[in-house]
Image (cartoon, helix red, strand yellow):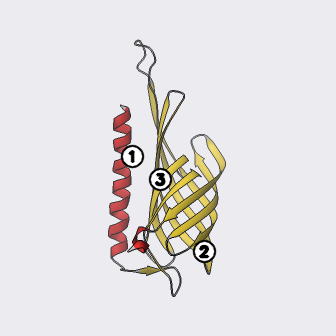
Amino acid sequence: MARGTLRCMSMRWLALTLVLSSSIGRADGVHATSDSQPTRTLVYVEALGKAGAYGVGVERPITPRLALGGAVSWIALRGQQIATVSPYLHATLVRRGNHALFGELGAVLVHSKIVSPVASWDGMSDTGGGGVAGLGWERGGKRFVFRAQGSVLVGEGGVAPWLGLAIGVKPGAFR
């Protein structure tokens, strides 16, 4: 696969996540995480999150306490190209004011490719999957959200702990 093809795949996954989450969320109209605070679609960037070293994600509420989301990333490290897609379910467990305890459960799909540095070798690629479960803290407002999360990743290589940070914006809050 060429570098452009991996980017195209990541963009397709992000577009699919956006379309699916927005169509599911539209069925209920405006959602609320508390009695007085309506929520909107969240767009975020993360460091060491569900999508690996960094990621870009989107999350759409489907009920007052549940949201569907997805994060994607692409990175090249020492000749290895890694594309990651991670759809997940976000659940607000406890909310008090602007603070919330949340849990997330999802899947992780990773495609890795090593491009050949020589003509006699085609290189190699591999695709694998796994799961992610996490618990975190959120500080949210009308427009911006900050999250810190501890997760457990499970895959072909075993089980690993993971910590991540995310900063997001609710674009609909600026209207």
* 153 on left or right of 114: right
Q: Residue 155, can we see it?
A: yes
Looking at the picture, does residue 41 appear above or below residue 108?
Answer: below
Q: Pinpoint residue 154: horizontal percent, then vertical percent.
A: 59, 49
Q: Secondary structure at mark 3?
A: strand
User: Which one is in front in this view, the residue at disc 3 or the one at disc 1?
Assistant: 3
Residue at the spot 43% in from the left edge and 74% down from the top edge:
173
Residue placed most toward the observer, 23 or 171: 171
> In terms of image quadrants, where is residue 166?
bottom right
Q: Which residue is mark 2?
A: 93
In space, the residues marked 2 and 1 are separated at their CA atoms by 30 Å
| Left or right: residue 54 compared with residue 11 | right
Mark 1 secondary-structure assignment? helix
Q: Residue furthest front?
A: 174
Point out residue 146 in the picture as x, y percentages from the top left corner: 58, 64
Task: Give the distance between the C-alpha atoms of the residues marked 2 and 3, in whole angstroms.
Answer: 24 Å
**Tag 1 residue:** 10
Q: Residue at x 56, y 63 (%)?
A: 104
Q: At 41% across and 68% down in the image, what residue appears?
A: 171
Residue type for callout 1: Ser
Mark 2 and 1 residues: CB-CB less than 8 Å, in contact?
Answer: no
Q: Earlier in the sequence, mark 2 or mark 1?
A: 1
In percent of width and height, residue 95 lies at 61, 78
Q: Is residue 88 left or right of residue 95?
A: left
Q: Amino acid at mark 3?
A: Val
* Numbered label tally: 3
Answer few, some or many: residues within 10 Å of disc 2's Cα (few below 14, many 20 plus, some between 14 and 19): few
Q: How far across and how far down the image is residue 134, in percent?
A: 61, 60
Which residue is at the front of the view, 55 or 101? 55
* The C terminus, quarter of image: bottom left
Which numbered disc covers residue 56? 3
Disc with the residue nearer the chain's start (2 vs 3): 3
